Image: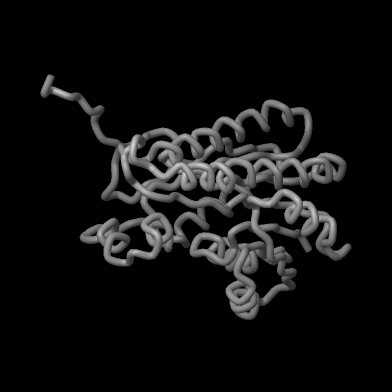
């Protein structure tokens, strides 16, 4: 039975990924910070699950979680680097520096650590797929996006650079770049302000977590000789905008 490790499994996207991989017959390593959410999710899945409660921003915790995997879960076939977040929308001069550093730690450093820890095993076994959950923000920056956009641009380049190092191996790397998805993303970004978060999706039909999950599993299901470098998806109601021009000067 193949094994998938999913970070951020206690969130909306992560749980959708877990459900989809379970239907494909994968055993799952569900990683997240919230034990109760992981336990509730595992109870709904008709597959074997191992729960790993840790914060991807903590390197030592990542290393401990992976080194203590039961033998039956250790040979990870698929890594879904899903854990991450956006914080704040203030212009850069007014942004909270702690928020910036937290986004870098979760979106960049956590992803890098998990990838580096699992890659040698994938290479030695001659199989593996790393799926990084990026964002259209990594291609189309916007006001107030600053470090979040930059972190997702990092994810894009890191994914391509991994492939540059791995092209002589069977290990595949894919960057999944969704646009507007209705999950708890905006609630986290606005630090629990449900009214502000709700306005992000008001009068729209955004992507659902399940839509992104379909993109993830489609990439995984391609023949072994096919590597999907990146998938960018937006809801029909969303599109890239024009460049800003200051005409007041």
In the rendered view, does 85 fall on the left or right side of 70?
left
| Of residues 147 and 28, the one drawn nearer to the viewer in this rendering | 147
- Residue 177 image point, x, y percent: 47, 43
Colouring scheme applied when the structure was drawn: one colour
- Residue 60 image point, x, y percent: 76, 51
Residue at the image point whose x is 49% and y is 39% from the top: 152
- Write down the quadrant of residue 92 in the picture: top left
| Of residues 183 and 64, the one drawn nearer to the viewer in this rendering | 64
| Residue 150 visible somewhere in the drawing | yes
Residue at the image point whose x is 59% and y is 41% from the top: 108
- Write down the quadrant of residue 229 in the picture: top right
| Quadrant housing the N terminus | bottom right
Q: Is residue 21 above or below residue 97?
A: below
| Residue 28 visible somewhere in the drawing | no
Residue at the far left: name it: 248
- Residue 194 image point, x, y percent: 32, 67
In the rendered view, does 43 fall on the left or right side of 92?
right
- Residue 73 image point, x, y percent: 81, 62
Residue at the image point whose x is 60% and y is 65% from the top: 18
| Of residues 62 and 7, the one drawn nearer to the viewer in this rendering | 62
Q: Is residue 98 above or below residue 202?
A: above
């Amino acid at each position: 039975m193949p094994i998938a490790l999913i970070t951020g499994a206690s969130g909306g996207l992560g749980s959708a990924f877990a459900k989809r991989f379970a239907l494909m017959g994968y055993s799952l390593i569900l990683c997240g910070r919230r034990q109760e959410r992981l336990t509730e999710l595992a109870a709904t899945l008709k597959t074997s699950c191992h729960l790993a409660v840790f914060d991807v921003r903590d390197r030592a915790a990542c290393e401990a979680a992976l080194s203590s995997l039961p033998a039956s879960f250790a040979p990870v076939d698929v890594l879904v680097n899903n854990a991450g977040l956006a914080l704040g929308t203030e212009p850069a001069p007014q942004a909270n520096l702690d928020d910036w550093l937290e986004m870098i730690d979760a979106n960049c450093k956590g992803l890098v650590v998990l990838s580096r820890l699992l890659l040698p095993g994938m290479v030695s076994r001659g199989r593996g797929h790393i799926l990084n959950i990026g964002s259209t923000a990594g291609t189309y920056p916007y006001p107030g996006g600053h470090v979040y956009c930059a972190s997702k641009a990092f994810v894009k380049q890191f994914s391509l650079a991994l492939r540059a190092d791995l092209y002589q191996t069977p290990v595949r790397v894919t960057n999944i770049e969704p646009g507007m998805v209705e999950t708890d993303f905006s609630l986290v970004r606005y630090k629990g302000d449900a009214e502000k978060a709700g306005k992000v999706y008001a009068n729209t039909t955004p992507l659902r977590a399940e839509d992104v999950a379909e993109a993830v599993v489609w990439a995984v299901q391609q023949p072994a000789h096919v590597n999907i470098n990146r998938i960018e998806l937006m809801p029909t109601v969303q599109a890239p905008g024009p460049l800003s021009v200051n005409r007041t000067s």
